[in-house]
């Protein structure tokens, strides 16, 4: 059955700004389909190029991460005519965003738990950047905690690689961290110290971190803090 | 009844407006226009403002039918913007405030745009796209505050357009952006340009350096016309802006969009935003060139809000600053009248 036909009968889980996510069964496995739909406000040539490019980049980056041992959804199938990606549904998981929010609200050793989490995220991102994968849209909603068995530590899974690309440049890695910093601090108030822990863990875990952190400091000074004369 | 006069001169527009309780009584403005291929420099701009500001002040009072004693307070742009023009404007504002014996209100330029946008359009709780020659930000309400969700990590979109206009020597009269818009309407061929969205942010210096280098080559080889380049540049830049606005809306669950700032006058940008809004069932609010482009009334309106919440600027504090970061999280003046802003 053709992909659009399959989706018309599937369960729609989420509609984001760029794609719809459906729940399906793929060869007997629970899977999700990420369908990028056309954006009518864009010029059709731009829209097709962008949509296709993002689908390709997403798959490429996920595969590269997985080969390096970073947890990301398994890609089962890609239909390039409809720009649909069939991938593993990460069952039994919650976003880091929800975890931080709920942990902040409970009062049992929240600081320790959050610090441990921040350290682990820093390590995973260091590994990803050492593979020269730039995520492009790092937020706490794009990192999942897959709950293992009772006594096992939860697995950190990276998702939503739609804006990702491959680059070795410290500038691009610095911007990647900047995007996360902004998303982190605006979604979770009063977490500046926690984010610093994340960066410290990143610095210790990555082999190329000093240039990246230097670039991050530079990027922070740009934009509206810059004099826009000329 | 509160009557506020606002002085705006942070870039090449010098405007003085008078507002009485949400009613715009007068809003005259002059623009410093440079020859094609040239941008405006701070000292020349300040010189232009100095030459016309008192004439514009008289116009503002005459058109409103008011005398200095009818004014309750004097608002002026504290920042951000270009140093020399800001100083010129602030100087006159300080002087008349002392001459007339009225309190001073130092206003943030960006907040002036937003306040005016909300006043004119009556948008309730919008995601704001603020786009001008000096600023590009997406501001939305989340977790009890207005926050900057997305912005440019290098130059503003208006700055990108203005500098492109200089490369192909488009006239700056009435503004380079307006002329690019008119030329774009005649373009038909879409030329592929770099598209750079990074999470919730955008970057324009890449597309600018690309088009600065490629424009002459493409034009001389006849690969495309200047109109095609204008068209392609707009389509690409505006798509990026619509995308980050949509992301902020999806994140906050917002159903209203308000576009403010000089680039907000662009009808193609408004059209594209409208298409996006319709697909999401959201509503678009936009104003016309009287209020999109820098003007005095918007400063008066923001000043009015400040004054009503009991804030004034002491003379010692009435300096200007080129890099005033809008503290959107601190909205004293709103908690008294609009619960949605709390």
Image: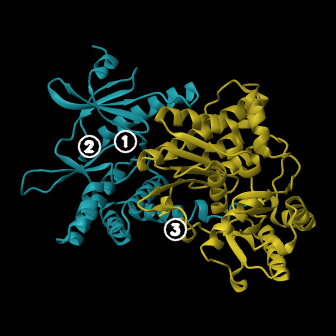
Chain colours: A cyan, B yellow
In the depicted view, which residue is nearer to us: B321 or A129?
A: B321
Q: Is residue B216 in view from this perspective? A: no
Q: Nearer the viewer, residue A128 or A47?
A: A47
Image position, residue B50 (x, y; %): 89, 68
Q: Residue at x 90, y 62 (%)?
A: B62
Query: Would you place residue A113 above or below residue A148 in this image?
Result: below
Q: Residue furthest left?
A: A150
* Both labels 2 and 1 in a single chain: yes
Tell me whether marks 3 and 2 sit on the same chain: no
The percent position of residue B224, horizontal first and vertical second, equals 73, 26
Q: Crowding near pointer 2: few (<14 within 10 Å), some, many (20+)? A: many
Distance between the Cα atoms at labels 2 and 1?
Answer: 9 Å
User: Is residue A81 left or right of A153 when viewed as pictured?
Assistant: right
Q: Which mark is residue A72?
A: 2
Q: Nearer the viewer, residue A22 or A2?
A: A22
Q: Earlier in the sequence, mark 2 or mark 1?
A: 2
* Secondary structure of the residue carrying numbered label 3: loop
Q: Residue furthest bottom?
A: B316
Look at mark 3 in the image and give the residue it sits on: B335
Q: Could you tell whether A210 is left or right of A155 in the image?
A: right
Q: Nearer the viewer, mark 3 or mark 1?
A: 3
Viewed as shown, does residue A90 lie left or right of A185?
A: left
Q: Residue at x 46, y 47 (%)?
A: B254
- Graded by Cα atoms within 10 Å as few (under 14), some (14 to 19) or many (20 or more), the crowding at tag 3 reads few
Kindly tell me whether residue B192 is visible in this rendering.
Answer: yes
- CB under 8 Å between discs 2 and 1: yes
Give residue A9's position: percent from left, percent from top. 27, 21
Quick one: SS at disc 2?
Answer: loop
The residue tagged 1 is: A161
Chain ID, mark 3: B
- Looking at the image, is B151 positioned above or below residue A221? above
Residue at mark 2: chain: A
């Amino acid at each position: 059955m053709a992909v659009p036909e399959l989706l018309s009968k599937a369960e729609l889980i989420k509609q984001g700004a760029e794609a719809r996510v459906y729940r399906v069964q793929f060869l007997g496995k629970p899977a999700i389909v990420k369908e990028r739909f056309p954006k009518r406000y864009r010029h059709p040539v731009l829209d097709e190029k962008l949509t296709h490019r993002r689908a390709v980049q997403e798959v490429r980056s996920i595969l590269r991460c997985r080969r390096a041992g970073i947890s990301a959804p398994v890609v089962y199938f890609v239909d390039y005519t409809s720009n649909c990606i069939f991938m593993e549904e990460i069952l039994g998981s919650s976003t880091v965003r929800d975890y931080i929010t709920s942990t902040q609200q409970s009062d049992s050793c929240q600081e320790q738990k959050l610090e441990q989490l921040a350290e682990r995220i820093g390590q995973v991102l260091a590994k990803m950047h050492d593979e020269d994968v730039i995520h492009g849209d790092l937020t706490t909603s794009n990192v999942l905690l897959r709950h293992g068995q009772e006594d096992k530590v939860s697995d950190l899974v990276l998702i939503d690689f739609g804006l990702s690309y491959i680059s070795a440049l410290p500038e691009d890695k610095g911007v990647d961290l900047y995007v996360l910093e902004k998303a982190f601090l605006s979604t979770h108030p009063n977490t500046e110290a926690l984010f610093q822990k994340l960066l410290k863990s990143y610095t210790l875990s990555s082999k190329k971190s000093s240039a990246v952190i230097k670039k991050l400091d530079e990027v922070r000074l740009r934009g509206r803090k810059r004099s826009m004369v000329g | 009844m509160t009557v506020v006069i606002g002085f705006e001169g942070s870039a090449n527009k010098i405007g003085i407006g008078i507002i009485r309780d949400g009613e715009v009584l007068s809003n005259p403005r002059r623009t410093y226009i440079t020859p094609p291929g040239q941008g405006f420099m701070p000292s020349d701009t300040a010189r232009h403002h100095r030459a016309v500001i008192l004439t514009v002040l008289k116009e503002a009072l005459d058109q409103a039918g008011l005398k200095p004693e009818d004014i309750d307070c004097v608002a002026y742009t504290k920042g951000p913007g270009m140093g020399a023009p800001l100083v010129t404007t602030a100087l006159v504002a300080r002087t008349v405030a002392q001459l007339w014996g009225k309190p001073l209100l130092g206003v943030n330029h960006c907040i002036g745009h937003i306040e005016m946008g909300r006043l004119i359009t009556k948008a309730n709780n919008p995601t704001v796209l603020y786009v001008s020659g000096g600023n590009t930000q997406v501001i939305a309400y989340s977790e009890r505050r207005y926050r900057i969700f997305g912005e440019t990590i290098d130059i503003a979109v208006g700055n990108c357009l203005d500098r492109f206009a200089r490369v192909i020597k488009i006239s700056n009269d009435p503004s380079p952006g307006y002329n690019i818009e008119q030329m774009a309407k005649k373009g038909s061929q879409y030329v592929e340009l770099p598209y750079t969205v990074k999470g919730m942010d955008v970057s324009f210096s890449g597309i600018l350096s690309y088009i600065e280098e490629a424009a002459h080559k493409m034009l001389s080889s006849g690969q495309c016309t200047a109109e095609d380049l204008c068209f392609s540049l707009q389509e690409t830049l505006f798509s990026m802006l619509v995308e980050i606005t949509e992301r902020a809306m999806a994140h906050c669950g917002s159903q209203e969009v308000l576009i403010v700032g000089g680039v907000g006058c662009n009808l193609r940008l408004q059209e594209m935003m409208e298409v996006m809004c319709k697909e999401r069932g959201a509503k678009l609010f936009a104003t016309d060139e009287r209020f999109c482009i820098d003007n005095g009334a918007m400063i008066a309106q923001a000043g009015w809000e400040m004054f009503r919440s009991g804030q004034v600027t002491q003379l010692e504090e009435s300096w200007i600053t080129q890099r005033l970061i809008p503290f959107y999280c601190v909205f004293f003046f709103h908690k008294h009248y609009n619960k949605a802003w709390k």
